[in-house]
Image (cartoon, rainbow, N blue to C red):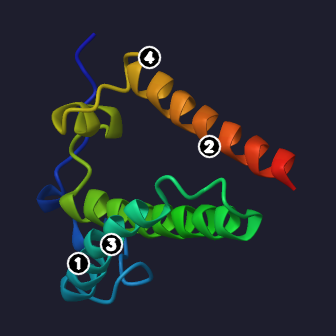
Amino acid sequence: MPAKMIAERKDIAEEDQWVLTPLFESDQAWEELFSEVEKALERYADYRGHLNETVSLFKEAIEFHLGLTRRIERLYTYAHLKRGGSQFPLDELRGAGVDMGSPEPIKRAIDHFGKLVDQLINVYESI
């Protein structure tokens, strides 16, 4: 059975393409948020080694992370749909050097989350 192919955006009639303006009004708006996210990534360093100091700081760090993750998801969704989705998402990630077909990225994420939970427990126990 031949491999299933996803049509290139350029090969799809305009009326059948995703409407992307709810995500971003323009490519320029996408570029602006991308720049903001790049700068915001540096804020992770502000929390490193301090998450066990106070519950409010830990909460602030979680809210920062969740907000940044939502913006990254929005950037990814727009870029993926704008590009035309000619590859499946797992293939795109593999092309970017992240092989979600292996358990390694999941293990790294779980290990990282485990460290955050340990820090939260330490904060709780110190109260």
Q: Circle 2 is placed at which residue position?
A: 116
Q: Quadrant of residue 56?
A: bottom right
User: What residue is drawn where x is 26% and y is 63%?
Assistant: 79
Q: Residue furthest left?
A: 10
Q: Which of label 2 and label 3 is nearer to you?
A: 2
Of mark 4 and mark 1, the one earlier in the sequence is 1
User: What residue is drawn where x is 49% and y is 22%?
Assistant: 107
Q: Residue furthest top?
A: 1
Asked whether, in this view, residue 68 is left or right of residue 18, the answer is right
Q: SS of the residue at dot 4?
A: loop
Q: Quadrant of residue 102?
A: top left
Crowd around label 3: few <14 · some 14–19 · many ≥20 (10 Å): some
Label 2 vs label 1: CA separation?
27 Å
Question: In the rendering, which numbered label is found on residue 37?
Answer: 3
**Do tag 1 and tag 3 residues touch (Cβ < 8 Å)?**
yes
Label 2 vs label 3: CA separation?
22 Å
User: What residue is drawn where x is 24% and y is 73%?
Assistant: 14
Question: Which residue type carries mark 3?
Answer: Val
**Do tag 2 and tag 1 residues touch (Cβ < 8 Å)?**
no
Q: SS of the residue at dot 2?
A: helix
In the depicted view, which residue is nearer to us: 4 or 31?
A: 31
Label 4 vs label 1: CA separation?
31 Å
Quadrant (top left/top right/bottom left/bottom right) for the C terminus: bottom right
